[in-house]
Image (tube, rainbow, N blue to C red):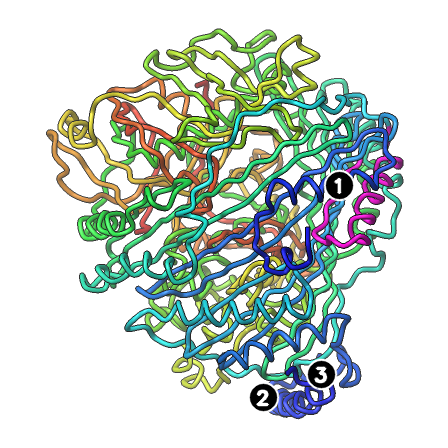
Amino acid sequence: MSRAAQDQGASSLSRADAEALARRVLGMSIATEARVSVNSGARGNTRFAENQISTAGDNTNTSVVVRSVVGKKVGQAATNRLDDAGLKAVVEMSERLARLSPDDSELVPELEPQQYQEGKGWSESTARLDPALRATAVTSITGPARAAGLVSTGYLETRATASAVANSKGLFAYDRDTDVVLTTTVRTADGAGSGWAGGASNAFSSLDPAALGARAVDKAKKSVGAAAIEPGRYTVLLEPTAVGNLLQLMTGAMNARGADEGRSFFSKPGGGNKLGDKVVDERVTIVSDPFDPETYGTPFTGEGLPTRPVTWIENGVVRNLNYDRYWAARQGKEPTGSAGGIKMSGGNETIESLIAACERGVLVTRFWYIRGVDPRSILYTGLTRDGTFLIEKGKIVRPVKNFRFNESPVVMLNNILGMGKPVRVSASESGNAGAPVVVPPLLVRDFNFTSLSDAV
Amino acid sequence: MSTSRREFLKRTSAAAAAGMVLAATGEAAHAERAAGLLGPASQGESAFSELLLRAIDAAKSAGADYADARVSLNRTQTINTRERRVGGLSDNETLGIGVRVLVQGSWGFAATSALTGDGVVRVARQAVLQARANRTPGRKPVTLAPAPGNQRGTWRSEAKIDPFTIPVEEKVALLLAANEAAMKNPQARFVNSSMFFLKEEKSYANTEGALVTQTIFRTQPSMTVTAVASGDFQSRQSNDIAPMGRGYEHVTEARLVDNAPRWAEEAVAKLGAKPVEAGRYDLILHPSHLWLTIHESVAHPTELDRAMGYEANYAGTSFVFPPDKVLGSLKFGSPLMNIRGDRSQPGSLAACGWDDDGVQPESFDIVKNGIFVDYQTTREQALWLEWYYKKNGKPTRSHGCSYAQSWADVQFQRMPNVSLLPGERDLVWEDLISATDRGIAIVGDGSFSIDQQRYNAQFGGQLYYEIRGGKIVGMLKDVAYQMRTPEFWGALDMLGGARSYFLGGAFGDAKGQPAQSNAVTHGCVPTRHRQINVINTGRSA
């Protein structure tokens, strides 16, 4: 890569530049085996508060991670100093760390060269989103909020990056992709009402900032004057974001080794794991597919293993747990090669028809501060936030105070009363671009709200 | 095109001298501290001074009214082991520059890893262009409070031994020996241990003449022991050893090999503990647990940007609002409660000589005898409270709470160390237990969750002990308490004295969008809180 290319910070390296950089690093290695990861690109963000842009940031970076195997010993080092001295230093550091460490009893050899499908996650509409275009998108939310006498706050983030993996056996993999996420919280000036809306995609062109802002404005207005109702077990209408908040906790717990070792919900009492067991409602199917336009992911893992579609749950039955290469070899399985995103099956209902079908329940916009309580049952706690409403006789009748829940996604998926159409959501609490999550709205019975919160 | 270093130094030593006058008149303690820390005027320079100056000059030339630039070389090392195996050994470094500008009261920020003369000029201009794009219609312009005190010099964490000078071999051997010690207990089936080290060399300059260089160390050794029985597993995390702003001496003093058998024993004991009966109990909270409750329920709601709605979309707002209704009058807790913010406690994670606004931090009261008296602030925010400081005859100045996690991120308000001051009576943990008839004592932090305005919280721990008649009578499990912040602190009726003060803390305190990680210490003593709601979290899914 030329100095000019680096200086322009033009961000994501081309396939040729990434390969040249990786080969240059591998050429400096004297290890038994070596692997190099090159990540490059640009990130941009614009924040707003009090109906105006508060801060923004643009940065460019290229980092190199070197993993060296010396005999059976492993070390790893990373740098973003790309001159010869910096690269030499990072190679030597990884080799030194390897020599100093004991033999790795779980060492897996580097992969031979692999075939990959082309990644499809790059969108020009996201890559070209500069500060001025971000400001325009933000203004389409702050303008109407200000006009309505409300206060909007929010965040727009873009990422346009290239990732590459190469190893000393000649493997090389390259992909570039984009991500964008836009979230907003609109509040009344006196803090008595709060509404949230958000969306995520790889393509900015598929987001509608004005519509998203209008949704948050509507919820902010309707949430004013929330009154308390008793905590307890309620039928809940979980909007897709709330479902996404909880569902990813269950897929995150589907590690095969933890299950086989007896320290997971997916462990079977008395030994073994729950592969093949029905654990949730038969309407539930959960897949990861890096080539599905709604859940684009990288076509390879950090080790250079090709990723592929994985069915985690099929009609309520556990079909796959996540096996890394070591544990797969030990258990006589194929390594999973998941790209991370998740998509859940849904139904034909809409949020409106699910409300109409509900005799008495609580509509939840999103959850917050979700933290593990007990890994044995995937029990989590957290709170509702930014749009919590009481449903009676098929209609939203009034806003209610927020609740704390203590509940497991496993229970949620066993108590399904109705399902809507799956949509892509911004499922991370922080509004950062995360792995794609596509989920339906769910009507769920007996959801466990354990206490009230005065927070608006 | 760039100002020469000589011109810069001339310009800035005048500004620094002006700063010292302010410090001497308004803040005697600060001037003293500054005098102890700072050397001759040429200090504060680093290998990157020239690039910093070029960047802020380029920003000025491009139209910035104010600019600052930050170069950081951040090196971290992580060692993970599991039973008899090293799971990961990695050493990461990242180097770059971030330039922040104000153009007509609008912020801009851009950052790059291209640390060349042309690279820093380009990124400075990019920040100015972005600031222009950010000038949305009808906006209120940003203004900055004065930065008192000396803004030139060098500062270094209190670290006796630079962890990066200790061979990795020695570190690995220590962790594996600790794992062996834990595994002597046959029911301790899984043992994870790790060390994490950070060394950040950070240089900062701004167009008001600040030029400072700081070296920051952070160190955390930790272990988790998991015991498994049929149908149950329980873990004990070593969070009685806190992460600290110290060097390798913190690892040595943590005595992992000596402590490992106890952690293993406690994990096993949890398997046989009695499930708690839900209800109201007097809680006695060990400092290794309480620091996190302070972090969530006191430190976060007293962040001024949060109270003013700037963090509403993620971290949330605050019940400590609006400022004119709560400052000097909100009853936060019992009169025994005194909370102070600082960046000066030796070995604390938030300690520094200057914050990322170039401000020398000061110690300040947040809660005084149970009454809320001040927020955490930056230069941008201090002016929002000018009316309050004037009314109380205090200078309007930042408390020094500006921080960015790396060169690639823009600085904003982050909490300093926020600590509960010891009580006047010389009480310790055992005194609180013997004074309690029916209660639960909680050691170590565990599960935690709190709402976005910091009212309703739920906390678990590592170890729970049942107290009857002033004595520990057995171990409990599946305990969590739910609380409403002002009631919880209002129910504080006993606390330890200076002898029982402990520094807890964490890396990874998240706030902001993109979420940035802050490292912070919370000093505290054991406390007793009357009649708090306890739930049982154990059930089968």
Which of A228/B449 is in front?
A: B449
Q: Secondary structure at mark 3?
A: helix
Whole-Å distance between the Cαs marked 2 and 3? 12 Å
Q: Counting residues from the N terminus, which is met first, the one under dot 2 or under dot 1?
A: 2
The reply to whether callout 2 and callout 1 are in contact (CB within 8 Å) is no
Q: Counting residues from the N terminus, which is met first, the one under dot 2 or under dot 3?
A: 2
Q: Secondary structure at mark 2?
A: helix
Residue A117 to residue B253: above or below: above
Residue B272 seen in the current view: no
The residue that label 3 is drawn on is: B32
Residue in the image at 51% along x and 64% along y: B412
Whole-Å distance between the Cαs marked 3 and 1? 41 Å
Q: What number is the disc on residue B90?
A: 1
Q: Is residue A7 left or right of residue B513?
A: right
Specify the quadrant that holds the C terminus of chain B: top left
Which of B283/B326 is in front?
A: B326
The residue that label 2 is drawn on is: B26
